[in-house]
Image (cartoon, rainbow, N blue to C red):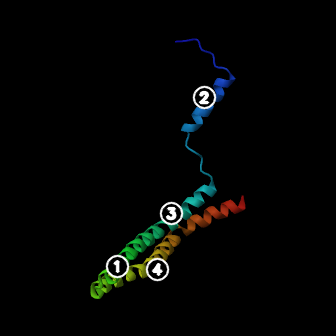
Amino acid sequence: MSNYIANGQDHKTAEQIRRQYLEPEENKLDQLRKLDEQVKKPGMIVALTLGIIGALVMGGGMALIMAYGNMVAGLALSIPGLLILIVAYPLCRAITDKRKKEYAPRIMQLSDSIMND
């Protein structure tokens, strides 16, 4: 063992390194933001996924019509793509509304405690 004696600068360096490995403390506002994200994110992911798929399917059908003049196959592909697009937003709202009801008590409790502090 060495007889090393740490000075003030060594203590500061050790503290800086130590802070990098500590879990960050979460305050109430951070918790509220995370809960809000948990409510909104799943519906948004579903809507974006359906929107992208619907747009690609509909675009494929339109390409069949415009590039190859195949009206029947183009419409057979475009109409389902359009229906997928139409369903995306209401499905997003339904998922978000369901999760709002689920998370509302905790969000209201946390926001009340923030506003009353």
Q: What residue sits right under mark 1 in the picture?
A: 63
Q: Is residue 11 above or below residue 20?
A: above
Residue drawn where x is 49% and y is 65% of the image:
41
Count residues near mark 3 (Cα–Cα under 10 Å), then give few for <14, some for 14-19, many for 20+. some
Which type of secondary structure does the marked residue at label 4 adopt? helix
Q: Earlier in the sequence, mark 2 or mark 3?
A: 2
Question: x, y percentage for residue 108?
Answer: 61, 67
Residue drawn where x is 31% and y is 83% of the image:
74
Q: What residue sits right under mark 3 in the picture?
A: 38
100 and 21: which one is in front? 21
Q: Amino acid at mark 3?
A: Gln
Q: Amino acid at mark 1?
A: Ala
Task: Tell me which corner region of the image, top left, top right, bottom left or bottom right, holds residue 70.
Answer: bottom left
Q: Earlier in the sequence, mark 1 or mark 3?
A: 3
Q: Amino acid at mark 4?
A: Pro
Q: What residue sits right under mark 4 in the picture?
A: 90
Residue furthest bottom in the image: 72
